[in-house]
Image (cartoon, rainbow, N blue to C red):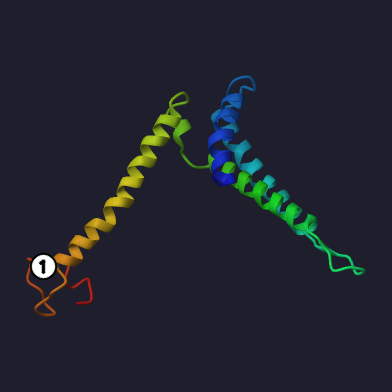
Amino acid sequence: MSAAVVAKVFVAKPLFEFLRGPCQLTVLGCRRFFSVVGFVGSAASMALVVFGGTYTVDTTSTAVTTTGAAISTLGFTLAMGFIGLHPSGFKANYMDLSLHSSGLLSGMGNTMASLAAFVAPLVVGHVLKEYVRCPAPRAPPSMPFCPVFVC
């Protein structure tokens, strides 16, 4: 699971509920908060990648310390997490539809999107199998897809 998905699923909703509840922010205030945190947090994380991700080579031996790689990985992971928070600032999301059932709505929406991604190649395969033989460049109305594909 990527850091952006983890931030979106496990951080955005509880943080939104906290900002709306005890902090008493409006929806617009929450959106502004998520946008600012997303932009500034990802920028600071990428600065960590640039300035903290250097390799130091010991000239007396052949050993290379890899703390720079660990810091770079941490910076990229944090940046992806902040990027996952950013869309909560400007996109309509499941929290706008229902505060208490956003997980259920998210699961249903993602299931429908996955089904569409599963069915589309089957439909294209059927269309190609049925209309792959075109008798002429100008196909009759019974073969409407033939001019679209190179036969």
Q: How packed is label 1: few (under 14 Cα within 10 Å), some, or many (20 or more)?
A: some
Residue 63, image x and y in percent? 84, 64
In this view of the protein, which residue sits in the foreground, 95 or 8? 8
Which quarter shows the C terminus? Answer: bottom left
Q: Residue at x 46, y 23 (%)?
A: 100
Tell me if 55 is positioned left or right of 10 in this view.
Answer: right
Q: Residue 34's quadrant in the figure? A: top right
Q: Is residue 56 above or below residue 115?
A: below
In this view of the protein, which residue sits in the foreground, 22 or 80? 80
Q: Residue 123's quadrant in the figure? A: bottom left
In this view of the protein, which residue sits in the foreground, 111 or 82? 111
Tell me if 15 is positioned left or right of 56 in this view.
Answer: left
Residue 96, image x and y in percent? 46, 31
Q: Is residue 77 visible?
A: yes
Q: Label 1 belongs to which residue? A: 143
Q: Is residue 89 visible?
A: no
Which quarter shows the N terminus? Answer: top right
Q: Residue at x 57, y 45 (%)?
A: 4
Residue 21, image x and y in percent? 59, 20
Q: Is residue 97 above or below residue 63?
A: above
Kind of residue indicated by mark 1 = Met
Q: Residue at x 54, y 43 (%)?
A: 5
**Figure label count:** 1
Q: Secondary structure at mark 1?
A: loop
